[in-house]
Image: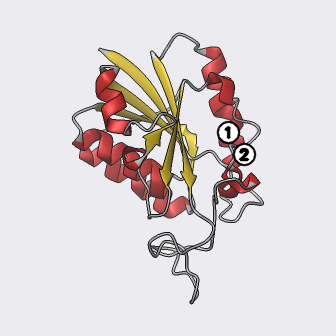
């Protein structure tokens, strides 16, 4: 039995001032770093995902290139690989991350389960290889990629905990509803303390 922390999309474009900035994103980045430093032996492995899109196309309809984005399925360009917006927020200490996962890469992707590691392994295969049975989920945004990643972890048979003080939502109402939905689906939702 191995426990992993999934740090979801703590990137410049998803924090204040970014292309899709979320209020509280920078604070979440700092709090996640503080949490990892305070609990260095809590996890056998720490994964971190990044949205990583191509800049030269609409990424499978994910980027609204010919119309206004609807902010549900289409978005302004964000997290384009090789740009500062795609990088981790500086308050997240990336040296505390064991495995880096990129998702998107030409297609819409919300869940870390859609991503691949730096050596090209699928994220689910890497979880299996490492024997991960339990995951704690933190990051941005509660109502989108955190929610999708936690639901996919549940569907993959993992025990899931969402650390509610280490997430940031696009909208406080939909963020709160996402936590309710995750609890109803079988995730534990609790503070990190």
Q: Secondary structure at mark 2?
A: helix
Which quarter shows the C terminus? top right
The x and y percentages for residue 78 are 63, 64
The x and y percentages for residue 102 are 51, 46
Q: Would residue 132 appear left or right of 165 to someone viewing this image?
A: left
| Residue assigned mark 2 | 26
Residue 12's mark?
Answer: none
Tell me if residue 46 comes above or below residue 114 in the rendering.
above
The x and y percentages for residue 110 are 44, 56
| Residue assigned mark 1 | 29
Tell me if residue 1 comes above or below residue 35 in the rendering.
above
Which quarter shows the N terminus? top left
Label 1 neighbour load within 10 Å: few <14, some 14-19, many 20+: many
Image quadrant of residue 52?
A: bottom right
Tell me if residue 94 comes above or below residue 29 in the rendering.
above
| Residues at marks 1 and 2, CA–CA distance in whole angstroms | 5 Å
């Amino acid at each position: 039995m191995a426990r992993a922390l999934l740090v979801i999309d703590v990137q410049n474009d998803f924090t204040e001032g970014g292309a899709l900035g979320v209020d509280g994103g920078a604070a979440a980045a700092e709090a996640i770093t503080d949490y990892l430093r305070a609990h260095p032996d809590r996890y056998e492995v720490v994964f971190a995902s990044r949205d990583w899109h191509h800049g030269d196309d609409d990424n499978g309809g994910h980027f609204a290139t010919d119309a206004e984005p609807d902010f549900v399925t289409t978005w302004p360009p964000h997290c384009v690989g090789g740009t500062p917006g795609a990088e981790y927020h500086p308050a997240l200490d990336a040296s505390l991350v064991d495995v880096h996962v990129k998702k998107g890469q030409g297609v819409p992707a919300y869940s870390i389960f859609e991503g691949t590691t730096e050596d090209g392994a699928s994220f689910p295969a890497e979880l299996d290889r490492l024997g991960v049975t339990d995951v704690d989920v933190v990051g941005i945004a509660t109502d989108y990629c955190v929610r999708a990643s936690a639901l996919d972890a549940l569907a993959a048979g993992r025990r899931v905990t969402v650390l509610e003080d280490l997430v940031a939502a696009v909208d406080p109402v939909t963020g709160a509803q996402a936590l309710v939905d995750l609890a109803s689906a079988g995730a534990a939702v609790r503070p990190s303390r």
